[in-house]
Image (spheres, rainbow, N blue to C red):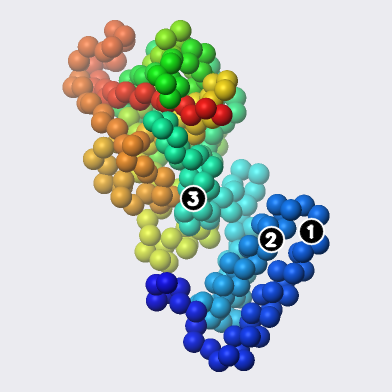
Amino acid sequence: MSPSTSPAKVSDEQRAREEELVELVVASFDGAPDERTRHLLQALVRHLHAYVREVRLTEAEWGAAIAFLTRVGHTTTESRQEFVLLSDVLGLSMQTVAVNNEAYRNATEATVFGPFFVDEAPQVEQGGDIAAGAPGEPAWVEGTVRDVDGNPLPGARIEVWEADEEGLYDVQHDDGRTYGRGRLVADDDGGYRFWGLFPTPYPIPDDGPVGDLLASTGRSPLRASHLHFMVSAPGCRTLVTHIFVRGDELLERDSVFGVKESLVHDWEHHPAGSPTPDGRDLGGRGWASTRFDVVLAPA
Ligand code: BEZ
Ligand code: FE
């Protein structure tokens, strides 16, 4: 046990009182008819009490925590989920992703979902442009979707979304615009290709209590540059992931702990005027490219 998690040195009488309370509360859930609910609540009680006892939580600190959570609740609306953001910056979202996406052979790793997915994104043809006018450097992204045995998965659904070069998703603008997102269907060989934007870093929403928590603890709200993917196919575990950019200095300190080495990609930059893979005329602009071969685990 590390020093920071050692039980506090208290008298035998004090320890007995504290332990008696833990057991009393745990036992209060003994009659919960649903076994899973009972397990979740009893383990929660044990861990929360262990925390209070380990740090010797003061009543002022307990009050500050309640006030903070109250602000988190008041900041949460239909379009702003501050509790999920809190879970994200504490690494709880990523831990839940890890627990629920067990490593399986060569299957692609999962990462956080984030708040900016939209159900009804535009359908985009193979080779189409998901940027749809969003500002940023054009980027060609191509790859395949396969199962863990290497069989192509034709018809797999590929949903992609990303921020513009100013670090904003379309839904963060208040004019109802749609850009930087799209849905594709893998071709007969499991292949896909599209134009998007070279990803750039951006801050998670930091104008609420979670932003204050980060600022007061010297942490940055910035996320490493990334492009979101959600890939699904019948019989396979749906994959929610991102691809990152090798060399991005934020890879080591992503504010939501979403970076996995296996998801860090090499991107090539092609100078202005270079021919494009599909002959698209970019009006003399430079462009970037990468490849992302997705491997889905069985469901
Ligand atoms: C995102 O990548 O879009 C995101 C993830 C977690 C919190 C905020 C944003
Ligand atoms: Fe994102």
Q: Give the residue drawn at x 49%, y 34%.
A: 240
| Quadrant location, the N terminus | bottom left
* Residue 20 pos. (x, y %): 68, 80
- Quadrant for the C terminus, please: top right
Q: Is residue 189 above or below residue 62?
A: above
Q: Is residue 276 visible?
A: yes
Ligand 1 neighbours mark 1 (CB distance < 8 Å): no
Q: Determine whether the beta carbon of the residue marked 2 sits less than 8 angstroms from the nearest atom of ligand 1.
A: no
Location of residue 107 in the rendering, given as x and y in whole percent from the top left corner: 42, 31
Q: Is residue 186 left or right of residue 26?
A: left
Contact between marks 1 and 2 (CB within 8 A): the answer is yes
Q: Position of residue 115 (x, y in %)?
A: 54, 41
Residue 297: x and y in percent read 48, 29
Left/right placement of residue 126 relative to residue 209 reads left
Which residue, given by chain and number where applicable, does mark 2 sit on? 41
Residue wearing tag 1: 32
What amino acid does circle 3 point to?
Answer: Gln
Are the residues at dot 3 and dot 1 in contact (C-beta closer than 8 Å)? no
Q: Which mark is residue 95?
A: 3
Q: Image height check: is 251 above or below 47?
A: above
Indicate left or right for 251 with 124 as reference.
left
In this rendering, does residue 177 appear at all?
A: no
Q: Earlier in the sequence, mark 3 or mark 1?
A: 1
Q: Secondary structure at mark 2?
A: helix
- Give SS at disc 3: helix
For image coordinates 45% across by 22% down, the residue present is: 147
